Image (cartoon, rainbow, N blue to C red):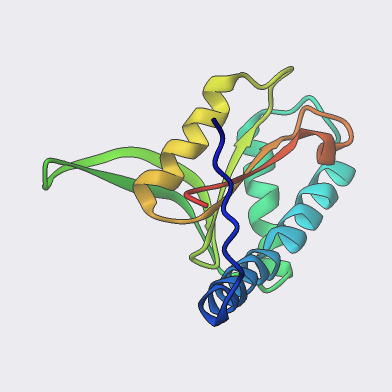
């Protein structure tokens, strides 16, 4: 037997809806667009077939030219049962203290690469990550946007 909720929406539901819409809007106001634009420019200039380190250096220049604040090789710490276990990973980029950017230059991405980014997001507490594979052409086909805990 299935049970359906026949309760009418009330003011409390409207408040929740506005809160959810505001949270959704915050995701749309992220820095994905300029980051992706920077990646497109990097691939336009360098092409495909280079090592990840070449793309990372060029992406740093493009992000700076766009006025974005970022850090490279950011240590990601972990805790276990309330105790710090130290640095467990290093994220390629953290842009504007809100987006983790993980770079690859591979023929194909595997589930482990997406799991890697999701791990970074969970351990860092950040909500948004971009997995960018510069070997894909055009690069926008190799970009995977991941959201943590929504």
Residue 148, given in percent of the width and then of the height, sits at 50, 48
Residue 103, given in percent of the width and then of the height, sits at 62, 38
Q: Nearer the viewer, residue 51 or 101?
A: 101
- Determine the residue located farthest toward the front in the rendered image: 1
Position of residue 84 in the picture relative to residue 110 (left or right)? left
Q: Nearer the viewer, residue 61 or 3?
A: 3
Position of residue 149 in the picture relative to residue 36 (left or right)? left
Q: Nearer the viewer, residue 62 or 129?
A: 129
Q: Is residue 20 above or below residue 123?
A: below
Question: Residue shown at 40%/41% (left/top)?
Answer: 90
Residue 104 found in image quarter: top right
Question: Residue shown at 71%/18% (left/top)?
Answer: 108
Position of residue 22 in the picture relative to residue 84 (left or right)? right
Q: Is residue 104 above or below residue 101?
A: above
Numbered label tally: 0
Question: Residue shown at 48%/31% (left/top)?
Answer: 116
Question: Residue shown at 77%/33% (left/top)?
Answer: 142
Report the quarter where the N terminus lies. top right
Residue 58, given in percent of the width and then of the height, sits at 70, 49
Residue 37, given in percent of the width and then of the height, sits at 81, 56
Residue 21 found in image quarter: bottom right
């Amino acid at each position: 037997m299935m049970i359906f909720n026949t309760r009418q929406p009330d003011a409390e539901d409207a408040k929740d809806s506005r809160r959810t819409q505001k949270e959704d809007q915050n995701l749309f106001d992220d820095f994905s667009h300029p980051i992706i634009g920077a990646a497109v420019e990097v691939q336009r200039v360098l092409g495909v077939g280079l090592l990840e380190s070449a793309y990372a250096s060029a992406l740093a220049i493009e992000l700076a030219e766009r006025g974005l604040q970022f850090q490279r090789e950011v240590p990601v710490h972990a805790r276990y049962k309330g105790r710090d276990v130290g640095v467990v990973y290093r994220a390629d980029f953290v842009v504007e203290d809100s987006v983790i950017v993980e770079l690859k230059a591979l023929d194909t991405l595997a589930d482990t690469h997406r799991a890697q980014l999701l791990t970074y997001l969970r351990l860092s507490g950040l909500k948004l990550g971009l997995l960018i594979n510069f070997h894909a052409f055009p690069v926008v086909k190799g970009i995977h946007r991941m959201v943590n805990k929504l």
